[in-house]
Image (cartoon, rainbow, N blue to C red):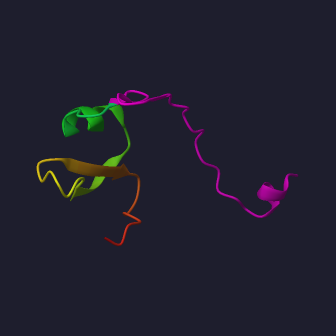
Amino acid sequence: MAAAESQGAVKRPARVDWELMPLNGVGPLCFGMPITEVAAVLPGMAELRRFQADPSFREILGVEFGTGPSSSTA
């Protein structure tokens, strides 16, 4: 029996490897995508929060997606 199994570790789904494309995006996500398209690419993920991504440009919005509560305190 593996050490993790003997300690009752939670089994999680395998992670998907996404390629980083500088100045373009990550995996199926592209910078500048509408939030609805991002949500469609991330099944099982929920929008956790929205935030101002760049203080110099108020119109630039950041969005955090995840499967649980936001871990950020900001």
Instruction: Farthest residue to the left: give it.
Output: 59
Which residue shows up at 88% across the image and 52% down it? 1
Query: To which quarter of the image does residue 5 belong?
Result: bottom right
Left/right placement of residue 17 relative to residue 66 reads: right
Q: Residue furthest right?
A: 1
Observer-nearest of 70 and 30: 30
The picture places residue 36, in percent across and down from the top left corner, at: 20, 36
Q: Is residue 65 left or right of residue 10?
A: left
Whether residue 34 is situated above or below residue 69 in the rendered picture: above
Instruction: Specify the farthest residue to the bottom.
Output: 73
Question: Which residue is pictured at 50% across the width and 30% down the height?
Answer: 18
Left or right placement of residue 70 versus residue 35 in this view:
right
Q: Is residue 54 above or below residue 32?
A: below
- Whether 43 is drawn above or below 2: the answer is above
In x, y percent, where is residue 29?
Answer: 35, 31
Q: Answer whether residue 71 is magenta in the image.
A: no
Task: From the top left corner, tell me how far across and down residue 24 is, in percent.
Answer: 35, 28
Q: Residue at x 19, y 58 (%)?
A: 55
**Numbered circles on residues, count:** 0
Magenta segment main secondary structure: loop
Q: Seen in the image, is 6 located left or right of residue 51?
A: right
Front residue of 45 and 55: 55
| x and y percentages locating residue 54 in the rendered image | 23, 53
Image quadrant holding the C terminus, namely bottom left
- Give, as a single range, the part of the protein colored magenta: 1-29
Q: Residue at x 12, y 54 (%)?
A: 58
- Inspect the magenta stretch and tell me whether residue 13 lies in it: yes
Write down the quadrant of residue 33 in the picture.
Answer: top left
